[in-house]
Image (cartoon, helix red, strand yellow):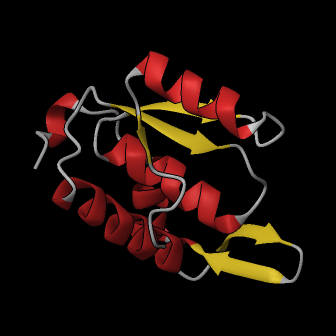
Amino acid sequence: MPDPDRLIPCPIAARARKTPDAPAVIVGDEVVTYGRLNKRIEGVAAALRARGVMPGDRLALMGREDVDAIIRFWAALRCGGIVCVMSPRLPPAALRERIETLEAVDISDTPV
């Protein structure tokens, strides 16, 4: 597990401790509270660590406007990863090339 003192503090975790039932993310009809969001972020962060993600690793993530993308983004940061947001408009070959050039791990399909 990364040294928490060397990582950027997560504002979502702090807010979840203070107001866990307050709405954090609203996308369409989906409303996620800070408490639930924090738990989901930690679950994905644990899965990323289990995959071997270490602080400083580059992590490719599709730039989508949904709750799962938000969770993956914050989970990557919580692991100390460097998030490389990819455009879903790029053709698959261009996406693969960018991910390879960055030497990034694609986390777009990590279960949330």
| Quarter assignment of residue 9 | top left
> In the image, residue 12 lies at what x, y percent?
49, 56
80 left or right of 20? Answer: left
> Which is nearer the eye, 39 or 43?
43
8 left or right of 91? Answer: left
Instruction: Tell me which residue sits at (19%, 38%) in the image.
Output: 54
Given the current orientation, which residue lies at the most extreme right position? Answer: 28
> Which is nearer the eye, 106 or 9?
106
Vertical placement of 8 versus 88: above or below? above
18 left or right of 9? Answer: right
Vertical placement of 12 versus 80: above or below? below
> In the image, residue 40 lies at what x, y percent?
44, 73
> In the image, residue 64 lies at what x, y percent?
75, 51
> In the image, residue 75 lies at what x, y percent?
41, 53
Instruction: Tell me which residue sits at (18%, 29%) in the image.
Output: 6
Instruction: Tell me which residue sits at (78%, 33%) in the image.
Output: 90
Instruction: Tell me which residue sits at (57%, 33%) in the image.
Output: 96
> Which is nearer the eye, 98 or 67?
98
Vertical placement of 58 versus 32: above or below? above
| Quarter assignment of residue 47 | bottom left
| Quarter assignment of residue 70 | bottom right
| Count of number-bearing discs | 0
Given the current orientation, which residue lies at the most extreme top position? Answer: 101
